[in-house]
Image (spheres, rainbow, N blue to C red):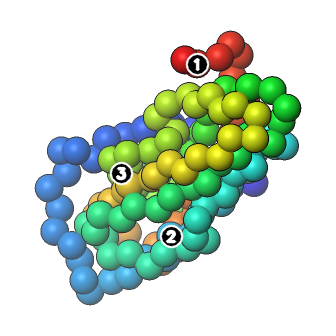
Amino acid sequence: EVPGNGKTGGSAAALNTQVDLSRTITVEFDANARGIWEFHPAVRSVQVHPGQLTTVMYEFRNSQNRRMAAQAIPSYAPRQAAPHFHKLECFCFNQYTLEPGEKREWPVAFIIDPKLSRDVKTITLSYTFFEVGGQTP
């Protein structure tokens, strides 16, 4: 289990950052669905420069025989990376409903703030997908 703050969002729309080409950070992606959906990142990791806009897709499939609504909650390791990991777009901002067997892809677009400590070389972004009560439209 990866510790985190459980916050689903933090917009980076107001960020005005320069790309720091002098350093590279590995961002690893993890997905946990606790059996409700098949849920995984399209890639396991990417190499990014702080300040660089990056988009990664996550793939979803409702493997249940009923319509299901769910939402993802992110966490970060190490914890000090969380305030520097700015998501511009994320499936974790909303709840989603999928029909039985339906497959979808949704993006995570992010920028890592160049103010992140130079000691941090790897960040793990982990999502846990939970079923939510009721159904979304």
Q: Distance between the residues labelled 3 and 2?
A: 13 Å
Q: How far apart are marks 1 and 2 (CA)?
A: 31 Å
Residue at 50 percent across and 58 percent down: it is 57
Labelled disc at residue 27: 2
- Element carrying mark 1: loop
- Element carrying mark 3: strand
User: In terms of image quadrants, where is residue 50?
Assistant: bottom left
Residue labelled with disc 1: 136
Residue labelled with disc 3: 86
Residue at 50 percent across and 41 percent down: it is 91
- Element carrying mark 2: strand
The x, y position of residue 2, in whole percent, is: 68, 55
- In this rendering, is residue 114 above or below 91? below
Kind of residue indicated by mark 3: His
Q: How many marks do you count on the picture?
A: 3
Sequence-wise, which precedes: disc 3 or disc 2?
2
Closest to the observer: 102 or 92? 102
Kind of residue indicated by mark 2: Val
Labelled disc at residue 115: none
Closest to the observer: 29 or 95? 95
Residue at 38 percent across and 55 percent down: it is 109
Residue that protrudes farthest toward the bottom in the picture: 22
For discs 3 and 1, the disc positioned in front in the rendered view: 1
Quarter holding the N terminus is bottom right
Sequence-wise, which precedes: disc 3 or disc 1?
3
Q: Decide: few, some or many residues near mark 3? Use Cα within 10 Å; few <14, some 14-19, many ≥20.
A: many
